[in-house]
Amino acid sequence: MPTRPDPVTPLWRAAQIFRLLSCLYALGFQIAVNDDLARPVLAWTLCAVLILWSVACAVAYLQGFGRRTWWVIAEVVVVLALMLSTEAVASAPWIADNQSWPTTLWATNATISAALQFGPVGGMAAGLAVMAAAATLKGYVSINLGRNATIVIELAVGLAVGMAAQTARRAHAELERAARLAASLEERERLSRRVHDGAIQVLALVARRGREIGGETTQLAELAGEQERALRRLVSAPDRDVTTGGTADIGALLRSRASDRVAVSLPAEPVLLEHEVAQELFAAATNALDNAAAHAGPEARVYVLLEDLGDAVTVSIRDDGVGIGDGRLAEAEREGHVGIAKSIVGRMDWLGGQAQLSTGPGCGTEWELTLPRAPGRRAVEKGQG
């Protein structure tokens, strides 16, 4: 079974370059101070352990099998043990005047590994452990940052490297989610085309011919029409996988309303809006479709067109029905029927968009719902509430 790629791999590789340089520095430091140490033979033995352990860590992290919690913790423990071994190889005056024997630069490898594995909190915790070992050797904690800024450096390294690793993992997760979304949409479109070219067209033909023939075949036509609509909703209804990062595809929502009387035309690419905004725009379009079904006439057809204009999204709902007579909307509002005023116009005003109605007796009805890409603050605030 293939393993998932590690998005932090480039950082692990860069860390091993730092490990090589810090090992060379530690070796140079050992050569320089060896004559001043109380037990130089023991110091060289521990230096060999340091080199071997560094090689083992480099191989483990580069190959990937060392990128485990237990290995990183083992590295921190080995680093602390080698730092504390300074008491065994050096005198008290030497310890008071110098850094720990393995050098804090080499010990920073443990901070970097912990940051890559556990993030900024783990990195800073390892940095504090390294500085605690150094303070144990000295017998005191230095708060003079002008003379000893090592603790600041350790914390900064743990924080910076940890945040870089955390950001890399999040970016990789977002990329994988986007890839899954694209694959899901592509598969949905493929299935929709195959079903549309087969079963849906047959059912639509049966429904249309049944109504034309009339008589006993009318019931068969109605059943075929119901099954066609159900099948359209099944193959085109938006599923949870195409909603990601708080956004929804308004095209997928509109496609769910397609039927033998409602034709939906969409762009080739998904039209993503904030989830709350997409739901409100879909609700306004749904109200317009319901009005057409109720008032346009039994033979009327409805055409839905979605356009992504870049800085705005437009949904047009047009029917070829009987239209709305002059003054009928005002009369309906006086009678208390405020569906159009509140469900369509009111929703679009609230979203920061606009709804335009074109109609007339015998001319059908057309709604044009236009929504800017950057809705007003009211939509955002409601989404947060």
Image (cartoon, rainbow, N blue to C red):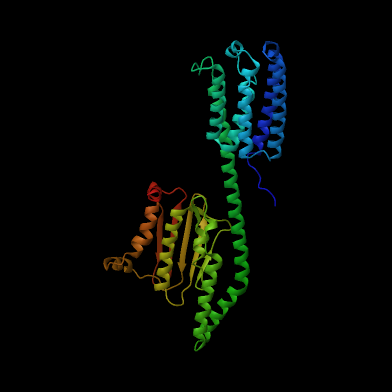
Count the labels in the image.
0
- Residue 344 position, x and y percent, is 38, 61
Q: Residue furthest left?
A: 334
- As displayed, is residue 190 above or below residue 174? below
Q: Is residue 187 visible?
A: yes
When asked about the image quadrant of residue 194, the answer is: bottom right
34 left or right, relative to 146: right
- Residue 322 position, x and y percent, is 41, 73
At 61% from the left and 18% from the top, the residue drawn is 87
Q: Residue furthest bottom?
A: 215
Q: Is residue 363 visible?
A: no
When asked about the image quadrant of residue 37, the answer is: top right
- Residue 93 position, x and y percent, is 59, 10
At 67% from the left and 11% from the top, the residue drawn is 36
- Residue 338 position, x and y percent, is 31, 64
- As displayed, is residue 200 above or below residue 267? below
At 54% from the left and 63% from the top, the residue drawn is 265
